[in-house]
Amino acid sequence: MQAYNVFKDLAIIIISAKLMGILARKINVPQVVGEIIAGLIIGPSLLGWVQQTDFLSQMAEIGVVLIMFSAGLGTNLKDLKKTGLTALFIAFIGVLLPLIFGYLLCIAFYGFSPLGSPDFYKALFIGVILTATSVSITVQTLAEMGKLKSKLGTTIVSAAIIDDVIGIIVLAIVIGIGTGSQDTSIPIVVLKNLSFFAISLVGGIVMYKIFKKIDSRYRHTQRIPIFGLSLCMALSYIAEKFFGVADITGAFVAGVILCNIRDSEYIERKIDINSYMLFGPVFFAGIGLRTNIQGISGEMILFSICFILVALLSKIIGCGAASKLCKNNLSDSLKVGVGMMTRGEVALIVAQKGLSVGLIDSAYFTPVILLIILSSVLTPIILKMLYNKDEKSLTA
Amino acid sequence: MQAYNVFKDLAIIIISAKLMGILARKINVPQVVGEIIAGLIIGPSLLGWVQQTDFLSQMAEIGVVLIMFSAGLGTNLKDLKKTGLTALFIAFIGVLLPLIFGYLLCIAFYGFSPLGSPDFYKALFIGVILTATSVSITVQTLAEMGKLKSKLGTTIVSAAIIDDVIGIIVLAIVIGIGTGSQDTSIPIVVLKNLSFFAISLVGGIVMYKIFKKIDSRYRHTQRIPIFGLSLCMALSYIAEKFFGVADITGAFVAGVILCNIRDSEYIERKIDINSYMLFGPVFFAGIGLRTNIQGISGEMILFSICFILVALLSKIIGCGAASKLCKNNLSDSLKVGVGMMTRGEVALIVAQKGLSVGLIDSAYFTPVILLIILSSVLTPIILKMLYNKDEKSLTA
């Protein structure tokens, strides 16, 4: 009966995220960075005014789903077709390199472990944590700069989506073999993923036709964004519940299904208002909230630094090189690499899974959380710098 | 780690509420009725697809706060000044009559109990449950019909707000005397309520000046609705936490504070989008969700019918007569009476409080829930009929 307590948390989150967001923009840094740092300030790391609660996590989950739905709605299907193969290649290399380098990092720290031994899987699991790109912060940054719907933006978002799927398959494989469990065997996981996309394709065409019919009759009415939002929620749920695919992937697919109807921009606008008013700040500040930077041991700091360096560089080099091989120029390839280096809630979920099956220790949460914060803060700053540099050289 | 489960609930709630809302409008009944019935259908009463969860209750709480904030934003202060005394009188009579009739109902059912006996306070408490009008459904209905900002709409909303405050004072008095507790003594409760409004007045003027300054510099920017929303959340929290005043009263006051800035309509629009997309359906369907109409004993049905009749008629007669005495015509007075007869979450909270201090039995939850549903369904239908009749006689 103390439902009113959420209002304290929300009031503090909304106002501090917005104020820090405004401050961030003043010093030419994307708003999201300000919002994440706001979470750090009001959270247990500093002031301790707001604690992460179940309610806030669920609001944050809705927030990230809305962001991905909006990104899907803004997708240009023609560009996606053009960038599809490139994105697949970038995603593949962008998973392979972090996996290998994560494993090598563990060997460097804890000594070599023979192939197939328990320590081998533990080391490999550190690599698995590093595989999945969190596209949401990159999406938000690209959207803020008006570059989300560019060809490069589409490439990055598609690659990150594919990368999530590959990452989930790798996770299932490593857990399946590493723990010898049955229900996560490789063929089943691959099959589940493939069937999700197959069913999305068929169901998506049906849904698209239904929405097109509603769309042609009613324009700019409440029902279209509301039906769109239910489709987004339904696909988020179905993806994760029945296919083991991340909910945010389902939300993105829902957006892609609707991206070609006449009112897609209208839906996007309504979703964006819901995002920036409440759910977005809760999600981004939530990243900062989730951590207590005061609780790190000296020993873990060295590992964390190397872990973060490996995480960032393996994505920049892997995805950047893959992009360069696909005939993008060096500047664009660098943007792809930086755009793909963000890690987010998926890395945390992977770490959580590894903990629950006994593959890693809870001590490894700290470097993961630090990686999420640092990559979330650095990606927007570096991306903005890269784009600004380009524009300067164009005007020069 | 199964945050995705909320997406199933939300997808079902959003789509069913909208579909039933559309259906309701087709048969000339306000949308909210459809949304409440959607909750009944998908909830434990019928299909059992969605169960009320903590998360959904908290979302619903945000929903009702947003509705009240929006109502406050749309307030015409000049009208409020004009209607203030009338509203106070309507609210006063509208509390007194249900209190007396609720007590008489209990005497009729369970026999007379001498003044000051434990049974006397139990009977009186049934009256207390009946005192507080839930304005949110009436607000939504008036808004749908475009009558919220009319003089009559303002009168009803102000009266319902004042009525809440009186209701809370009466609750505290009855609980304070009935259970002999210390911290809810009459003078303290009255003092707390008065100080909330005094502080709101002073703080409100300061806040108004700050917002006016921001408003004059930036127009139609995200920051104004976002700062407004934090003010709403903060006041909702402060009202309930420090003054024991309902959070929705705080939200309404926050709206009134901002109703005269240049961008008030802009804030209202953004809040309304958040409302109708997600929080509104969750709130209205939540009323239907919260109940299981299959679990009622035959014995309780008779009491429930009488309880509901007393509840509705005492408000219609009390508020209607008070309005007529204030020189409104008969048709408008009837609208005031019907507009004030809705009961909502406040009645449930009061019943909960009575249960927790041992004044009533949990069996009395059923008639309260039925009253909420029935009054929520009937108020919009009857109000619409009354307004339609008026317009017909005007055009005739």
Image: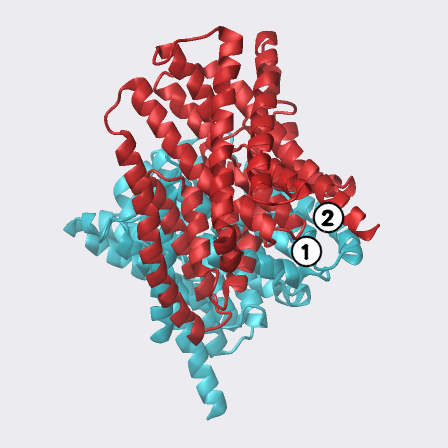
Chain colours: A red, B cyan
The chain containing the residue under callout 1 comes to: B
Residue B319, horizontal then vertical, whole percent? 47, 65
Residue B287, horizontal then vertical, whole percent? 36, 52
The residue at 53%/9% (across/down) is: A109
Q: Can residue A37 be seen in this view?
A: yes
The kind of secondary structure element at disc 1 is helix
Whichever of labels 2 and 1 marks the residue nearer the N terminus, that label is 2
Q: How crowded is mark 2: few (under 14 residues within 10 Å), some or many (20 or more)?
A: some
Residue B181, horizontal then vertical, whole percent? 45, 30
Q: Which of B16 and B164 is in front in this view?
A: B16
The kind of secondary structure element at disc 2 is helix
Q: Mark 2 points at which residue?
A: B207
Q: Residues within 10 Å of mark 1 (few under 14, many from 20)?
A: many
Residue furthest to the left: B298
The quarter of the picture where residue A308 lies is top right
Q: Mark 1 points at which residue?
A: B258
Q: In this view, does A338 lie to the left or right of B247?
A: right
Quadrant housing the N terminus of chain B:
top left
The quarter of the picture where residue B215 lies is bottom right
Q: Which of A131 and B252 is in front in this view?
A: A131
Q: Nearer the viewer, residue B206 or B119?
A: B206
Residue A108, placed above or below residue B140: above
| C-alpha gap between disc 2 and disc 1 | 8 Å
The chain containing the residue under callout 2 comes to: B
The quarter of the picture where residue A367 lies is top right
The type of residue carrying mark 2 is Met
The residue at 67%/60% (across/down) is: B264
Q: Is residue B102 visible?
A: no
Contact (Cβ within 8 Å) of mark 2 with mark 1: yes
The type of residue carrying mark 1 is Leu
Label number found at residue A154: none
